[in-house]
Image: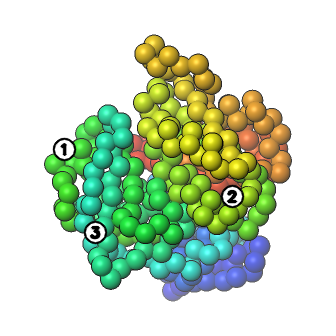
Amino acid sequence: MAFNVTLRQSSRQFQVEPDEPVLTAALRQGIGLPYGCKNGACGSCKGAVVEGRIEQAPHSSSALSNDEKTRGQALFCCATAQSDLTIDVREVAGVGDVQVKKLPCRVNALERKAEDVIELKLQLPANERLQYYAGQYIEFILKDGKRRSYSMANPPHHEGPLELHIRHMPGGTFTDHVFGAMKERDILRFEGPLGTFFLRDKFDKPIVLLASGTGFAPIKAIIEHAVFKNLNRPMTLYWGGRRKRDLYMMDLAEQWACEIPNFRFVPVLSEPDAGDAWTGRMGFVHRAVIEDLPDLNGYQVYACGAPVMVESAQRDFTQHHRLPEDEFYADSFTSAADLAHPV
């Protein structure tokens, strides 16, 4: 027997089948709820159960703590209904406007951007075009059925191959293949576009863009989309890495700072090598934001990269520096390791 789910803020309703995650049911029926990893690791789909009962599947404790569960919070990507529900979670407009597809693609080019970063370009079939929002991602479908997620680094108006930035994770089945055996003209399969991390372009608030490592990829798409749309909102990009080589497209970011009106670029390194001859900002990248903007009320923040960076930024910005919770948008680059000790 299906259960009814009511969204507290809009009163919209949808049905969820037994053993079906609430998020899956919502997306299936064109209801846009926030999500990222879809496996209980990132916390993007977190909301409150106002009425009713759920069963929460195993998940990362950093995505949903026991204290939050006690206060009625849930991860809807891995929560199933045990009764009719009323839930309080931010709705995302526009997600249902783009079609999610499963498509084959051909490797168009592989270019090393750093020792451990490859720019992978994918050519779609001649009769196909992927519509997506700048900031969204695709999931590669591997031969064993497992999936690997990567964000588009080029904006949706771009004509030509899809651009992804792949960081090598030694021992990782997919990235070992990309950096070892993959070659041009290889065939891959993916599903997309996915995710609710994309630019909300109907606002005029100044934007803080926060990236660590290859979290730069969707941020790049967002910036290039904003330029294409002639959005004149002030934008500041804070891009962090351990060493200078981690900022693998720093020349491009510096070019933007010279050419785009109202755009600033702040590179931040946490552990520069002596050979980097680094004279720029040092420390945690989200702390650089706080140093420059101690009062974030009136801003929008888009953060992407390592989970620890995203979590720290969200906590510090919203709890101590007046950023409204609904103005923090994030894509946390989680992996299987983030579910190594689920609760």
- Amino acid found under the numbered disc labelled 3: Cys
- Amino acid found under the numbered disc labelled 2: Gly
Up-down: is 283 above or below 9?
above
How much space separates mark 2 and mark 1, taking CA atoms?
A: 46 Å
Quadrant in which residue 169 is drawn: top left
Residue marked by disc 3 = 105
Please indicate, yes or no, whether residue 343 appears anywhere in the rendered image: no
Element carrying mark 3: strand
Residue at left 70%, top 62%?
231
Residue at left 62%, top 75%?
94
Residue at left 62%, top 59%?
227
Element carrying mark 2: loop
Up-down: is 283 above or below 131?
above
Residue marked by disc 1 = 180
Q: Which mark is residue 197?
A: none
* Image spot of residue 20 (x, y percent): 47, 74
Sooner in the amino-acid sequence: mark 1 or mark 3: 3
* Image spot of residue 59 (x, y percent): 49, 52
Q: Nearer the viewer, residue 5 or 160?
A: 160
* Image spot of residue 95 (x, y percent): 58, 74
Q: Which mark is residue 72?
A: 2
Q: Nearer the viewer, residue 238 or 138?
A: 238
261 relative to 107 in the view: left or right:
right
Quadrant in which residue 296 is drawn: top right
Mark 2 vs 1: CB contact within 8 A = no
Residue at left 39%, top 55%?
164
Up-down: is 105 above or below 99?
above
How much space separates mark 1 and mark 3, taking CA atoms?
A: 19 Å
- Amino acid found under the numbered disc labelled 1: Gly
Mark 2 surroundings: few (<14), some (14-19) or many (≥20) residues within 10 A: some
Q: Nearer the viewer, residue 93 or 203?
A: 203
